[in-house]
Image (cartoon, grey):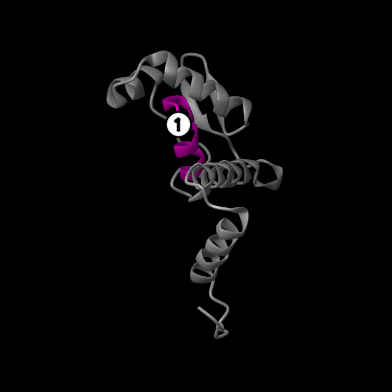
């Protein structure tokens, strides 16, 4: 996965998990590029994509911030959609079928949100 895409997905995941909240400031493009050891244009591309997705707002001379709550929790949903796309893409590259991916996801969901019912089968 390209570096700019990794940044986008990490920010989306952090928003979805509540690790980044509305109003939180992101590192500057140059600061993040220096920390990550990548070109500042790569970070700038990620920030532009995050802004187009409505997850951050960049204000010239002030920085980039996680946007305030949007109707429908759009930033959280965008983060979840990105994680889902990545999960499916990796599973596909590894040669799993749609049925195998669905079973694994259902198993993981059952662990995350148990219903209290005993499941039959393996």
Residue 3 shown left or right of residue 92 in the figure: left
Residue 21 shows in the view = no
Mark 1 crowd level (few <14, some 14–19, many ≥20, 10 Å Cα): few
Against 56, residue 110 (above or below) is below
The kind of secondary structure element at disc 1 is loop
Q: Residue at x 51, y 47 (%)?
A: 95
Q: Main secondary structure of the magenta part?
A: helix
Of residues 102 and 25, which is closer to you in this image? 102
Task: Give yes or no for residue 13 being in the magenta stretch.
Answer: yes
Residue 19 shows in the view = yes
Q: Position of residue 47 (x, y in %)?
A: 50, 24
Q: Position of residue 5 (x, y in %)?
A: 48, 29
Residue 25 shown left or right of residue 69 in the figure: left
**How many numbered discs, if any?**
1
Q: Position of residue 79 (x, y in %)?
A: 56, 43
Of residues 62 and 1, which is closer to you in this image? 1
Of residues 32 and 6, which is closer to you in this image? 6
| Quarter containing the N terminus | top left
Task: Give yes or no for residue 87 being in the magenta stretch.
Answer: no
Magenta part of the protein: which range?
A: 1-14
Direction right: furthest residue? 71
Which residue bears the numbered disc 1? 1
Against 87, residue 37 (above or below) is above
Residue 11 shown left or right of residue 75 in the figure: left
Q: Position of residue 2 (x, y in %)?
A: 45, 26
Of residues 86 and 58, which is closer to you in this image? 86
């Amino acid at each position: 996965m390209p570096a700019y895409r990794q940044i986008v997905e990490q920010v989306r995941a952090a928003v979805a998990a509540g690790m980044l909240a509305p109003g939180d400031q992101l590192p500057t493009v140059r600061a993040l590029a220096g920390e990550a050891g990548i070109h500042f244009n790569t970070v700038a591309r990620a920030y532009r994509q995050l802004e187009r997705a409505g997850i951050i707002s960049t204000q010239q001379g002030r920085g980039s911030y996680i946007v305030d709550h949007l109707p429908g929790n759009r930033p959280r949903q965008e983060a979840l959609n990105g994680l889902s796309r990545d999960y499916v893409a990796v599973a596909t590259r590894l040669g799993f079928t749609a049925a195998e991916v669905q079973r694994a996801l259902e198993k993981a969901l059952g662990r995350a949100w148990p219903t209290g019912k005993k499941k039959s089968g393996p």
